[in-house]
Amino acid sequence: MARITAGIATSHVPLIGVGIDQNKSQDPYFKPIFKGYEWTKAWIEQPENKPDVVILVYNDHASAFGQEIIPSFSIGCAEKFKSADEGWGPRPVPLIRNHTDFAWHIAESLIIDEFDMTIINDMDVDHGLTVPLSAIFGQPTEWPTLVVPIMVNVITYPIASGDRCFRLGEAIKKAVERFPENLNVQIWGTGGMSHQLQGPRAGLINQQWDKRFLDDLTSNPERLRKLPHIEYLREAGSEGIELVMWLVMLGALTNPKELHRHYHVPASNTALGHIVLENEK
Amino acid sequence: MNDDPHEYKAAFEDIPGTRIFNSERARKGYSLNQFCMTLMNPVNRANWLADEEAYLKDWKITPDQKKALLKRDYNKLLELGGNIYYLAKVFSTDGLSFVQAVSTMTGMEVEDYQAMMAAGGRSPDGLRSIKDNT
């Protein structure tokens, strides 16, 4: 049986990708950014922690989906995905390979469970998906895991509520447990933490709010699932809303235990947050 | 969660200096944003940079949107229905980073904006609600 063994959350700031692609790990700006991933890199190399498949929850940033199609929740079912050209050329990263039987199984299970997923058979993936992979796996010639992409619309309002995202996570957990193959599965939630990329209020950071969010992933998940959108927007900035995607991860875990945390300001315009959560055995 | 769409959206308009990409903005900015998507291709980027006005000829964007686009007035573009992730294709084509482009919307010089970020970013205090500040 497939089993979710851990949840990993991380910001997916494009600049982290730039730092990796341009080998800037020793640069004073990037050093504290990358230092917080060293623990995770060592942890994930241990055979018991190495995932066969990562279910990677992220948002497309007007790369695969323009305004012509805006799916609230979608799942990538293609065999492979290449890195998108977001306006500065594609990031030089390996092809992302899917476990298509597993992805289709998850799609079926979710739809039967009344989460009406849009199935995506052809798309490029942007920094939202590739930056987390690079932050945690560095620069391999092939990614050491298969990836099932799950996309959440967090750009065009209304977007899914935090509670709806949490319940999607619960339905993903059920789907994983119904898959007969023995797989070590991780679920990753990406985006956040506080940041605002628009208007005169750009540059907003709320460290206190972010830290409470990190704490409550393990100590008070019920508070997090009830947070209304307006609170994210007021407190964590307009792009801080991406944190609802961490709740998809959280909903897929059972009594998670915090193993590692990294928080650093700034990464570009953003408060960088990263956490590793072990799932109950 | 408030399930009345009018109240749900109205609450967002109370946040200072922020334009949430609601259906009204998305509809107004449709062509503008779809134009931005074409810059995800190196040939189109070269054509755009070679002659911006000519490139826009086939796009149904308003004179105001066109003017703001040619001036790279991002606050104005947001007001006219642009969304930052679409507009990112324009500033990326210009060779600007997110920090460089985003700082232009704040009235700060990029160095001052970077210094603010390095010092922990902009505090939300006094910037949570227009109502509460009046």
Image (cartoon, coloured by chain):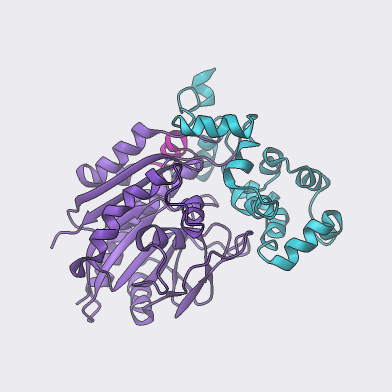
Q: Which residue is found at the position 46% from the left and 42% from the top?
A: A29
Q: Along the horizontal axis of the image, is B51 left or right of A78?
A: right
User: Measured along the vertical axis of the image, is residue A141 above or below residue B93?
Assistant: below
Give the residue at the far top of this rendering: B134
Asked which quadrant contains residue B14, the reply is top right
In the rendered image, is residue A221 in sight? yes
Q: Which residue is found at the position 34% from the left and 73% from the top?
A: A106
Asked which quadrant contains residue A213, the reply is top left
Give the residue at the far front of this rendering: A26
- Chain B as rendered: colour: cyan
Instruction: Give the magenta part as a residue range.
Output: A227-236
User: Measured along the vertical axis of the image, is residue A229 above or below residue A150?
Assistant: above
Question: Residue A107 in magenta?
Answer: no
Q: Along the horizontal axis of the image, is B100 left or right of A204?
A: right
Rendered purple, the chain in question is A
Front-most of residues A256 and A15: A15
Q: Magenta stretch mostly in which secondary structure?
A: helix
Question: Residue A235 in magenta?
Answer: yes
User: Measured along the vertical axis of the image, is residue A53 above or below residue A191?
Assistant: below
Question: Residue A249, how many percent across, how many down?
Answer: 31, 57
Front-most of residues A143 and A76: A143
Question: Residue A228, how many percent across, how many down?
Answer: 39, 41
Q: Which residue is found at the position 44% from the left and 46% from the top?
A: A30
